[in-house]
Image (tube, rainbow, N blue to C red):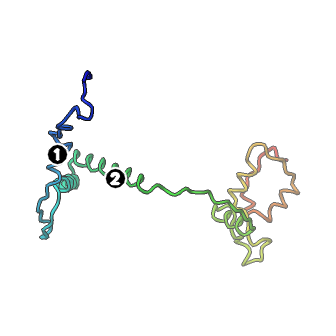
Amino acid sequence: MSGRFVKGQSGNPNGRPKKRRPNVSAFDIIFEKRLAVTQGGVERELTVDEALQFQTYQAALKGRKMAIRTVLKMIEKREVALRKLSPEPERRPKPLQFSYHSDSANEALRLLNIYCKNPEWPDGGGPRPEVVETWAAQAAISRPGRRTLDQKKREGLRLFIKDFGKLRWPRSTG
């Protein structure tokens, strides 16, 4: 036998040595111990980890800043873990459908206080049941870049504007 190893014989007859130290830390051993705790007259068992979390929660409720920070971090970690366990389902955008109706446009103008019931309609049988508010008409005729209106067109608007006599016409409109 000229070789270094004998054929059929292990180079390590005792085998791999056993680990001397377990992978579990001292904190893991302590945290897994169970404590008997009485809460509200009811006795129950908690792990040391659960008891410490409960104490931190109680301190946070009392307003201790470090405890509040710790609880907020615990909440954040929990939310991240929950999101990983149940990811949100894929959301597909719903196709938009538009439908227009003259009543919905009129209602929008009423809600914006641009369009109102004609105060003259029920009493004197005014020309229109609904009219444009004075402020909205004033804003329209006062804006820059407007078209000039002659006297005949102004009088035609009288039927559609609430207080037509209160309008102040710009000089450039004829």
Q: Is residue 50 left or right of residue 79?
A: left
Q: Position of residue 92 (x, y in %)?
A: 60, 57
> Going 20% across and 56% down the picture, which residue do you hit?
50
Task: Please name the residue that numbered disc 2 is placed on.
Answer: 78
Which disc, if any, is residue 27?
1
> Going 85% across and 61% down the picture, which residue do you hit?
156
Q: Position of residue 16 (x, y in %)?
A: 21, 37
> Going 75% across and 61% down the picture, which residue do you hit?
164
Q: Is residue 116 left or right of residue 28?
A: right
Of residue 172 and residue 160, the one placed in the foreground of this image is 160
95 lies above or below 30: below
Of residue 16 and residue 47, the one placed in the foreground of this image is 16
Mark 1 residue element: helix
Q: Amino acid at mark 1?
A: Phe
3D distance between C-alphas at marks 1 and 2:
21 Å
174 lies above or below 123: above
The numbered mark, 1 or 2, whose residue comes first in the sequence reads: 1
Of residue 69 and residue 100, the one placed in the foreground of this image is 69
Which disc, if any, is residue 84?
none
63 lies above or below 36: above
Q: Position of residue 33 (x, y in %)?
A: 14, 55
Are the residues at dot 1 and dot 2 in contact (C-beta closer than 8 Å)? no
Of residue 130 and residue 95, the one placed in the foreground of this image is 95
Q: Residues within 10 Å of mark 1 (few under 14, many from 20)?
A: few
Q: Is residue 66 left or right of residue 130?
A: left
